[in-house]
Image (spheres, rainbow, N blue to C red):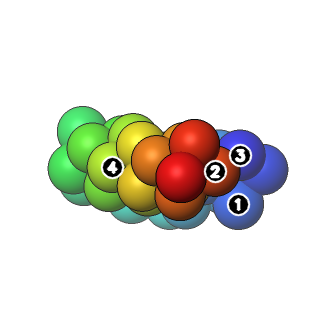
Amino acid sequence: MLWFASLGKQESEDNCSNKKEVLSRKVKDTVIRIK
């Protein structure tokens, strides 16, 4: 999440969209781990 923190500071306008992308990636990783 460190890279996300740095991106959030530079692109505060796209913070919401970035969070959605991070959440989607986490969900995909979790699904892969479950499988």
| Residue at mark 2 to residue at mark 3: CA–CA distance | 19 Å
Q: Is residue 21 left or right of residue 29?
A: left
Q: Amino acid at mark 1?
A: Trp
Q: Please tell me how crowded label 1 is: few (under 14), some (14-19), or many (20+) other residues with Cα within 10 Å.
A: few
Please name the residue that numbered disc 1 is placed on.
3
**Which residue: 46% across, 47% down?**
31
Label 1 element class: helix
Of pointers 1 and 2, the one earlier in the residue sequence: 1
| Residue at mark 4 to residue at mark 3: CA–CA distance | 14 Å
Please name the residue that numbered disc 3 is placed on.
1
Label 2 element class: helix
Of pointers 2 and 3, the one earlier in the residue sequence: 3
Question: Farthest residue toward the right?
Answer: 2
In the image, 9 versus 16, the foreground residue is: 16
The label nearer to you, 2 versus 3, is 2
Instruction: Please give the label number shown on residue 24.
Output: 4
| Residue at mark 4 to residue at mark 1: CA–CA distance | 16 Å
Of pointers 4 and 2, the one earlier in the residue sequence: 4
Q: Is residue 35 left or right of residue 33?
A: left
Q: Amino acid at mark 3?
A: Met
Q: Amino acid at mark 4?
A: Ser
Q: Is residue 24 left or right of residue 22?
A: left
Instruction: Please give the label number shown on residue 33.
Output: 2
**Which residue: 33% across, 49% down?**
24
Q: Amino acid at mark 2?
A: Arg
Q: In this picture, is 28 found above or below 12?
A: below
Marks 3 and 1: in contact by CB < 8 Å?
Answer: yes
| Residue at mark 4 to residue at mark 2: CA–CA distance | 14 Å
| Residue at mark 1 to residue at mark 3: CA–CA distance | 5 Å
Q: Is residue 25 left or right of residue 5?
A: left
